[in-house]
């Protein structure tokens, strides 16, 4: 009898504590509060099933700002993109680095950098991001082109011009993963390619599959085998190994030099930092490359316009594409590929579902318009959910339709998009916002452009008939670019002209 009473009373006690702890009621000046009936979890399950539809329904009922209890956190969603600038510019009371400071160390396995044990390290890490932009971006872009050519030539461009079949996602991830890796970390001293790349990529995919759970702070020991895989991935970046590689990017070299200044960082800690950057550099880029390619390939009329644009930029620069010679395109030439850029932006609009998070450092009154304020409690999360903006029919006509030239107008990039008759400052946000905005965004767009340029000039590509269209896997909603739920078979061959 006692065996039943004890566990039962424990369950009631836990439920009682959770109910009391999450018995929050809406105070004057606070946004509408949506808690659901499940203590602690609140609306987590509904949100997780389909965040976009969930938020749209609540916006209809509660207006453009409301607070939702999700897995123990009170999250205030700012739905109206005209209000985004008020959150993005708000520095003093909102903490922008919750993810990098709290979640990233636990996820990637390095010690907390902001713990005071490593004075100046967070600032130096932030400063190192400048090497992903400006002049260094030219070097990285040039190096990326060489590496893409290397992998394409050795794995896909060999000789014959018969049709070959392949899975589209596999093609994207095998080429982009290795070329990005070589560009960032460099190559072994005596050969052009690292051995063990396929295993490294597969291990990263396994780790990445667990990423949504790790971010939700599920302890890694509960995720079967993930800790061992993470350790294997980390070991790949042992400082002794990295230092023997050549052609390493200035960005990675600078980070390695920063870590050397800290005696309290062990070799494995340093390796874990390098591993985290590998994840950041490919985690979103690989699915983003897939969607950019997928939408072009299933829209042959768009593909023809983009291919024509690439050919005319090459022709104007006197470049003749030859699969046996490295093709070099400067950043300036890449910048002239506006249809291509628009098609990439359009695929990012359709596939990105990142959540921009800030944490309130104190109770305060957040100004949202000239005369509009909401009360925010310390510890609450303020969130922007740009997917809702990307799919807003008032901003983007027929938002579910792929329109490759949506971001192109009168020979230049289209940047004016409107809500309630007012021009939006932020209308496309796959890379986050404000001070946590992705520092790799220019490199990411360039490398996707380079991949597609090479693909379109060297290959004919078609989707094999009789397959269902690719749909998005909703499991990463809130975390970046959605993955395809299934792969799709293509056939490709070397172009003859
Ligand atoms: C299409 C590709 C990419 C997308 C959609 C993307 C998206 C994002 C987003 C949304 C964030 C902000 C996360 C937050 O709010 O805290 C972020 C951060 C970051 N991204 Fe990217 N990213 C991409 C490619 C890259 C690449 C290629 C690199 C490096 C070469 C990179 C490096 C980083 C780093 C280091 C951060 C953390 C910045 C910080 O801690 O302040 N990303 N990315």
Image (spheres, grey):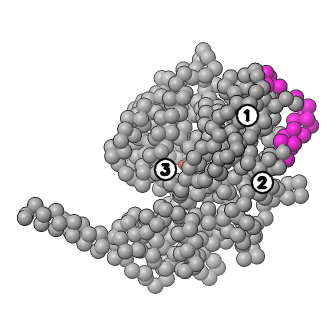
- Give the vertical position of 290 relative to 49 (above or below): above
Label for residue 404? 2
Ranked by sequence position, the earlier of labels 3 and 1 is 3
How dense is the environment of label 2, judged by Cα within 10 Å: few (below 14), some, or many (20 and up)? Answer: many
Label for residue 492? 1
How dense is the environment of label 1, judged by Cα within 10 Å: few (below 14), some, or many (20 and up)? Answer: many
- Give the vertical position of 67 relative to 48 (above or below): below
User: Is residue 41 in sight in this rendering?
Assistant: yes
Left or right, residue 280 beside residue 391? left
Give the structural element (helix, strand or loop) at label 1. strand
Q: Which x, y percent locates residue 367?
A: 58, 75
**In the image, which residues are magenta?**
305-325
Left or right, residue 449 beside residue 203? right
Residue shown at the point (41%, 74%) measured from the top left? 35
Q: Which residue is mark 3?
A: 100
How dense is the environment of label 3, judged by Cα within 10 Å: few (below 14), some, or many (20 and up)? Answer: some
User: Is residue 479 in sight in this rendering?
Assistant: no
Q: Which x, y percent locates residue 122?
A: 50, 46
Q: Which x, y percent locates residue 83?
A: 63, 72
Q: Which x, y percent locates residue 158?
A: 72, 22
Which residue is farthest top?
A: 190
Residue 378: quarter of image: bottom left
Which residue is farthest bottom?
A: 28
Towards the viewer: 457 or 62:
457
In magenta segment, residue 3: no
In front: label 2 or label 1: 1
Indicate yes or no: mark 3 CB to ligand 1 under 8 Å: yes
How far apart marks 2 and 1 lie (CA) works out to: 22 Å
């Amino acid at each position: 009898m006692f065996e039943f009473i004890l566990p039962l009373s424990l369950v009631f006690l836990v439920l009682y504590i959770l109910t009391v702890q999450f018995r929050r009621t809406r105070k004057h000046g606070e946004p509408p509060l949506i808690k659901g009936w499940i203590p602690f979890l609140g609306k987590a399950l509904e949100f997780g099933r389909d965040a976009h539809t969930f938020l749209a329904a609540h916006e209809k009922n509660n207006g453009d700002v409301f607070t939702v209890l999700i897995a123990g956190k009170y999250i205030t969603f700012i739905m109206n993109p005209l209000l985004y600038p008020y959150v993005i510019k708000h520095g003093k009371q909102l903490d922008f680095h919750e993810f990098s400071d709290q979640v990233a160390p636990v996820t990637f396995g390095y010690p907390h950098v902001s713990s005071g044990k490593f004075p100046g390290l967070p600032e130096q890490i932030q400063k190192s991001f400048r090497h992903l932009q400006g002049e260094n971006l030219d070097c990285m872009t040039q190096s990326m082109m060489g590496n893409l050519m290397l992998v394409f030539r050795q794995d896909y461009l060999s000789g014959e011009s018969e049709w070959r079949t392949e899975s589209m996602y596999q093609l994207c991830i095998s080429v982009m993963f290795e070329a990005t890796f070589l560009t960032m970390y460099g190559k072994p001293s005596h050969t052009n390619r690292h051995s063990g790349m396929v295993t490294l990529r597969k291990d990263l995919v396994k780790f990445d599959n667990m990423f949504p759970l790790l971010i939700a702070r599920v302890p890694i020991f509960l995720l079967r085998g993930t800790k061992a895989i993470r350790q294997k991935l980390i070991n790949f970046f042992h400082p002794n190994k990295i230092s023997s590689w050549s052609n390493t990017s200035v960005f990675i070299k600078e980070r390695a030099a920063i870590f050397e200044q800290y005696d309290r960082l062990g070799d494995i800690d340093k390796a874990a930092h390098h591993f985290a950057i590998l994840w950041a550099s490919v985690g979103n880029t690989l699915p983003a490359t897939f969607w950019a390619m997928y939408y072009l390939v299933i829209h042959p009329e768009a593909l023809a316009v983009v291919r024509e644009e690439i050919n005319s930029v090459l022709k104007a620069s006197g470049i003749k594409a030859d699969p046996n010679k490295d093709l070099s395109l400067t950043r300036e030439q890449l910048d002239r590929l506006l249809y291509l850029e628009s098609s990439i932006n359009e695929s990012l609009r359709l596939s990105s579902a990142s959540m921009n998070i800030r944490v309130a450092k104190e109770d305060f009154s957040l100004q949202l318009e000239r005369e509009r304020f909401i009360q925010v409690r310390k510890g609450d999360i303020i969130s922007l959910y740009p997917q809702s903006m990307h799919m807003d029919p008032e901003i983007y006509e027929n938002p579910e339709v792929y329109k490759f030239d949506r971001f192109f107008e009168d020979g230049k990039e289209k940047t004016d998009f409107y809500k309630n008759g007012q021009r939006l400052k932020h209308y496309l946000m796959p890379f986050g916002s404000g001070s946590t905005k992705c520092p790799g965004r220019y490199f990411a767009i360039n490398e996707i452009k380079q991949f597609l340029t090479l693909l379109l000039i060297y290959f004919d590509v078609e989707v094999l008939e009789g397959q269902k269209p690719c749909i998005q896997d909703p499991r990463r909603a809130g975390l970046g670019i959605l993955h395809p739920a299934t792969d799709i078979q293509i056939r490709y061959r070397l172009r003859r002209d």
